[in-house]
Image (cartoon, rainbow, N blue to C red):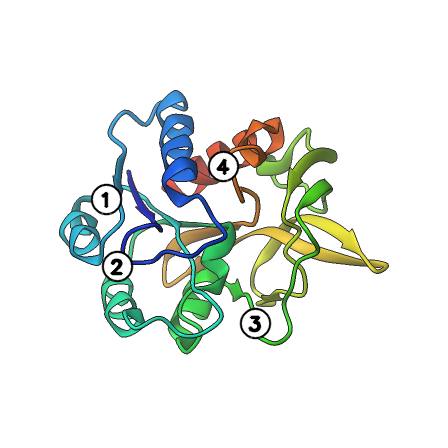
């Protein structure tokens, strides 16, 4: 199990990547994944990726394209295994259509947004086992909104904003492999919510199956 974390080659001033990636690794280990490696450089990512059972991406892009985007796109383009992208990973590679196709959706600069971080209720809109028992769940997080989601993706969780349901979590199958996006997980407080821990564990189990 490989976690690509922001904070090294990909850093921003808004997300405590080192802390959240360490927490993600703890959650995965508690779920029975005993070999979890966290890396934060592209060199380490490329070196570890061929042996990864699942790739978990906990890194994102800032307001402008990142100088290393072409290199990251090359590395990810060579990966054909299961993928789980977390929270701000929806903003990665803004000029890469391949990343959006791989992920089944993305953050759209100039359109997507989020209200100030705060109390948030997410609700299930699918009968998929991943969200069994999660009809309505409270957390404290950033409510990513107006994301673009492919018609082929299955939305699992939404939050409500301005009278409309905003996708927060979805799954898809891309080129014969399973992928998932989980919009929860801005910071450590977000991972104190049971829904964040449950959804992450179930998504990783689903993509790896």
- Mark in the foreground, 4 or 2: 4
Q: Residue 194 shows which numbered tag?
A: none
**Which residue does the numbered mark 3 point to in the structure image?**
108
Between the residue at mark 4 and the residue at mark 2, the CA separation in whole angstroms equals 21 Å
Q: How busy is the neighbourhood of tag 3: few (under 14 within 10 Å), some, or many (20 plus)?
A: some
- Mark in the foreground, 4 or 3: 3
- State the residue in front, 45 or 198: 45
Determine whether label 4 and label 1 are within 8 Å by CB: no
- Is disc 3 placed on a helix, strand or loop? loop
- State the residue in front, 120 or 164: 120
Q: Residue at x 27, y 65 (%)?
A: 72
Q: Residue at x 69, y 33 (%)?
A: 134
Between the residue at mark 4 and the residue at mark 1, the CA separation in whole angstroms equals 17 Å
Determine whether label 1 and label 2 are within 8 Å by CB: yes
Q: Residue 52 shows which numbered tag?
A: 1
Between the residue at mark 4 and the residue at mark 3, the CA separation in whole angstroms equals 23 Å
**Image location of residue 24, percent across then percent down:** 41, 34
Q: Residue 79 shows which numbered tag?
A: 2
Instruction: Give above or below for 30 relative to 23.
Output: above
Determine whether label 2 and label 3 are within 8 Å by CB: no
Instruction: Give above or below for 121 relative to 87.
Output: above
Between the residue at mark 2 and the residue at mark 3, the CA separation in whole angstroms equals 23 Å
Q: Is residue 186 left or right of residue 207?
A: right
**Image location of residue 12, percent across then percent down:** 42, 57
């Amino acid at each position: 199990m490989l976690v690509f974390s922001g904070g090294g080659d990909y850093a921003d001033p808004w997300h405590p990547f080192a802390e959240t990636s360490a927490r993600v690794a703890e959650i995965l280990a508690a779920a029975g994944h005993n070999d979890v490696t966290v890396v934060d450089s592209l060199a380490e990512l490329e070196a570890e990726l061929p042996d990864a059972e699942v790739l978990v991406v906990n890194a994102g892009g800032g307001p402008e394209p990142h100088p290393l985007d072409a290199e990251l796109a090359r590395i990810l383009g060579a990966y054909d295994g299961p993928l789980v992208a977390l929270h701000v990973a929806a903003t990665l590679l803004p000029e890469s259509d391949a990343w959006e196709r791989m992920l089944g959706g993305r953050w759209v600069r100039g359109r997507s947004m989020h209200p100030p971080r705060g109390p948030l209720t997410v609700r299930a809109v699918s009968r998929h086992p991943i969200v069994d028992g999660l009809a309505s769940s409270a957390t404290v997080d950033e409510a990513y909104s107006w994301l673009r989601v492919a018609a082929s993706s299955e939305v699992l969780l939404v939050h409500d904003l301005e009278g409309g349901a905003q996708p927060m979590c979805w799954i898809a199958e891309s080129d014969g492999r399973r992928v998932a996006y989980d919009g929860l997980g801005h910071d450590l407080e977000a991972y104190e919510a049971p829904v964040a821990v449950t959804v992450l564990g179930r998504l990783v189990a689903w993509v790896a199956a």
